[in-house]
Amino acid sequence: MLNIKWIGLILILLLLVVLDTFCIPTNINPFTDFKLSETILFSIRLPKILTAMAAGIALSAGGLMLQQLFKNPLAGPYVLGVSSGASLAVGMVIIGGASLPFLHIFYFQSISIALAGFIGAFVVLLLALLVSYRFGYSYILLLFGVIIGQILGAFQTLIDYLANPTDLKQFSLWNMGSFYNTINDSLYILVAFVSFGIIWSFRLMKPLSIMILGNDVAYTLGVKTKKVSLQILMCTGLLTGVVTAFCGPIAFIGMAVPNVARMMYKTANFKKLLLFNVLVGAGMALFCDIIGNLPFFNFHLPINVSTALIGGPIVLFILLKRKY
Amino acid sequence: MLKFSKLSIQRADTTLINDFNVETEKGGLIILTGANGSGKSTLLKTLVGLLPITKGEIIINKRAVTNYAHEERARTIAYVNAQKIEEAYIRVIDLVRLGRYPYLKVQHEKALEDVNIAGVLKALSLEAIQYNYLNEISDGELQKSTIARALVQDTPILVMDEPTAFLDYPSKKELFKLLRAMALEKNKVIICATHDVELAAIFGTEFWHLENKLISVSDKSIAWN
């Protein structure tokens, strides 16, 4: 039973990778036109696949950690305003930093964008933690996220308003989310940051699994709950911040995937749950890319359109099915 | 085994407990009573290390608790409160096994073998539902599972803050009976804050009543007289 789930998941994931590599948005056949296929494969398709998988992995891992930490199945990087925090910080660096010459040096711009995403995400997460300490793990936290998102959105609008038309268009497109903006250095940095964050998150899973007993009881079992909570926030900030920086604020993957994973693979072993969860996340991101690029659309949909169309109903289902 | 020496606890300039002295040499079921807001939970949280000591000392096995390392304390005192667990998709048995966490670093795999988990499940009549998921069991069963988790932690001292809140009468009686037996047979100090005074009066071996910042200690139930 257990193995069937893993094998099925891995097969589906492989199928999605192959489909997204060779057929989306148009078929390429490496056997007939090798030169053209090679170019498309290595400069467009593979970066896209890697980006989508890194984003799916990072967002679903971040979502799982936030849901467990805040004991709220509706928590997620987007809902809590974390993505908005990252967006604003990245916006300030891109638009404000354009005048700083050192930002144009190779690698430096990508790294500063990634760091800005991390800092923006982490600050909002820290505020969310303070709110949860004060009010408990309740709907207030979700409302906090919505309101913070609105406030940060207002600043974002202000930046948009002040930006020149070229920057504005780029910024708006970025806001809709895309797996196609990462090339060369930004792809390496994305993959490096996400790998580091994922290794870190695996190390946090054992204490996090004890914290299902409540923070007080977990503390009396030897878990340094405050330290672990802070590390969870930093790790989530890193994972979601860097993805938001390079792919835009992507909704629903972080919230929906952990719920699906938990329901499909019920376990108290959180390391296994995290692994299952990130594989579902990677698959979900690829699936959303495929849906957004189906040949008959004639153009590719922004990723947030497909994540909302697929993730939205899942989240609604969970919300309505929940016992209160 | 457990000694409170001139213990005082303050919360935000308000003294909740003043100059508490008591020494417990052998195992027993200590019943802690007191009105809502009198400071029962504060006392218990201070004992398990969740809140700081304002003045005085708590001494376990001749050493001040403040000198215990965090993990060592987890192998000495177990704590149960009435907070509900929101998790849905884990099994009762896995929840109970979490109690072995303080031993994982020192004993690794053996941590799960050297305590009688099956015996604890049987004693709390959780055997039949041990493979059920938490969203399939009742609030009372969930509470019994968290108590089983604390028993599996296998500590000489067990601190319980209203562990019977969600239980029906027969389960409450069963639980107090079990706690008393464990305290006396395995020489454990079990401190239990409760409002179920009638049952507690039957099964308790020592009674602490908290009123007006002072704790009176007796071997008979003295609550609410």
Image: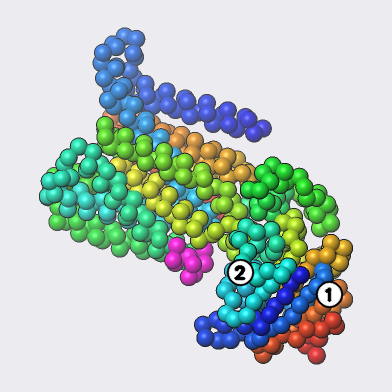
Name the subunit of mark 1.
B
Characterize the local packing of mark 1: few (<14), some (14-19) or many (20 or more) Cα atoms within 10 angstroms: many
Q: Which residue is mark 2?
A: B66
Q: Quadrant of the N terminus of chain A?
A: top right
> Left of A197 or right of it: where is A270?
right
Give whichever of A311, B225 is nearer the camera: B225
Numbered label attached to residue B204: 1
Q: Residue A72, position in %: x, y?
A: 52, 57
- Callout 1: SS: loop
Q: Secondary structure at mark 2?
A: helix
**Could you tell whether A103 is left or right of B156 in the image?**
left
Q: Tell me the residue at 47%/25% (across/down).
A: A15
How is the protein colored in the picture? rainbow
The span picked out in magenta is A129-137
Q: Residue at x 57, y 74 (%)?
A: B52
Position of B82 relative to A267 (above/below): below
Residue B33, position as x, y percentages in the image:
74, 80
Q: What kind of residue is marked 1?
A: Gly
As for residue A133 lying within the magenta part, the answer is: yes
Which is more foreground, mark 2 or mark 1?
2
What numbered label is drawn on residue A79? none
